[in-house]
Image (cartoon, grey):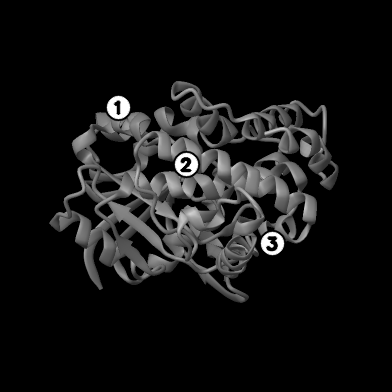
């Protein structure tokens, strides 16, 4: 039993699975989630989690209202969608309920979280494994891969090592002194595979098995990689491969890229994009802090990113109900990619 108290803020696909797998391994695990039905089912009869095909049920301390929480908690694991960060975190900060916050969110939201909780109170992290929300009280972990954690200044501390021990009961954990480079590498995964998976309605591996989908995904990756290089970031390995190994610039790169795709899909091929899950539930996606972030940062550095920009346009059309996800979206890029 690890001597720590943990609050999971957001019990969706990643947060809910994390809480369930920590239960019984950590002194206290509590969950805060705005979905009252989901919260009720987590309490009784318990959250049903299918972990790589093996089902388990865990009764959890779950709350829909932060007023019902008593602290302090050593860590708050933040797994929220970007639009909900301020609303969920501000009450926790005002009541002093949490010592250290941990960003495990998608997209470039770390500085936004730091402005809410204080930069010295935040550890950055990424999640490489995938999970699916099957409805209130039921989740499924679909792939296995590590958490990556780091302090923004690169210096590991006692709290960083304790956090790694806690999350180690869920999945493997890697500590890095270069979390900013790791966050951008993860953004390449989200912008390329998740963004394209969402607008096409496909799993990651299904995108990459479609010749047109693979062409678009590699174009998205190349744009994001070039924007990362423009920031003088040292991009880290992600999904078992070096970020540069998926950059296709000419025929001579094809062999290297194909080998890297095989490795990456071995880790994440069964992943269903969280943005696709949002579209299916009629919710606003995080495309603006994922593909939109690539576009915005690229603009700051004078780099055009038309393939990522088109993902943003398509996603907003789908959010408005003007178009549905499908393979037909791959045709939207044919002329654009050839003209790059």
Residue that mark 2 sits on: 80
Residue that mark 3 sits on: 205
Judging from the image, what secondary structure is the residue with disc 2 in? loop
Nearer to me, 163 or 91: 163
Instruction: Give the quarter of the figure containing the C terminus.
Output: top right
- Tag 3: Cα neighbours inside 10 Å, few (<14), some, or many (≥20)? many
Judging from the image, what secondary structure is the residue with disc 3 in? helix
Nearer to me, 171 or 134: 171
The disc, 2 or 3, on the residue closer to the chain's N-terminal end is 2
Residue 66 falls in image quadrant: top left
* Position in image of residue 89 (x %, y %): 36, 34
Residue that mark 1 sits on: 115
Judging from the image, what secondary structure is the residue with disc 1 in? helix
Q: Residue at x 62, y 58 (%)?
A: 252
Residue 70 falls in image quadrant: top left
Answer left or right for 100 relative to 289. Answer: left
Q: CA distance from mark 2 to mark 3?
A: 25 Å
* Position in image of residue 285 (x %, y %): 61, 35
Residue 53 falls in image quadrant: bottom right
């Amino acid at each position: 039993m690890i001597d720590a108290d943990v609050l999971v803020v957001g019990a969706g696909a990643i947060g809910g699975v994390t809480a369930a797998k920590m239960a019984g391994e950590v002194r206290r695990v509590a969950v805060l989630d705005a979905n009252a039905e989901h919260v009720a089912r987590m309490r009784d009869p318990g959250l049903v989690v299918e972990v790589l095909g093996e089902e388990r049920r865990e009764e959890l301390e779950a709350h829909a209202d932060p007023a019902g929480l008593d602290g302090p908690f050593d860590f708050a694991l933040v797994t929220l969608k970007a639009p909900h960060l301020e609303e969920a975190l501000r009450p926790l900060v005002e009541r002093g309920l949490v010592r250290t916050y941990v960003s495990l969110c998608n997209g470039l939201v770390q500085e936004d979280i730091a402005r809410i909780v204080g930069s010295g109170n935040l550890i950055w992290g990424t999640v490489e494994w995938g999970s699916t929300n099957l409805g209130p009280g039921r989740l499924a972990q679909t792939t296995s891969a590590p958490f990556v954690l780091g302090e923004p200044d690169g210096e590991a501390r006692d709290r960083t090592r304790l956090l790694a021990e806690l999350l180690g009961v869920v999945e493997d954990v890697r500590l890095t002194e270069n979390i900013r480079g790791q966050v951008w590498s993860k953004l390449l995964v989200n912008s390329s595979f998740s963004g394209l998976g969402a607008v096409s309605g496909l799993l990651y591996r299904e995108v990459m098995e479609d010749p047109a989908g693979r062409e678009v995904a590699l174009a998205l990756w190349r744009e994001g990689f070039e924007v990362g290089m423009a920031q003088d970031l040292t991009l880290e390995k992600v999904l078992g491969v070096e970020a540069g190994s998926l950059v296709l610039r000419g025929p001579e790169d094809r062999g290297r890229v194909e080998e890297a795709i095989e490795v990456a899909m071995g880790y994440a091929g069964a992943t269903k994009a969280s943005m696709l899950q949002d579209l299916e539930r009629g919710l606003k996606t995080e495309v603006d802090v994922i593909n939109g972030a690539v576009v915005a940062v690229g603009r700051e550095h004078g780099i055009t990113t038309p393939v990522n920009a088109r993902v943003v346009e398509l996603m907003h059309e789908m959010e408005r109900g003007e178009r549905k996800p499908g393979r037909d979206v791959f045709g939207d890029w044919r002329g654009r990619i050839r003209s790059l």
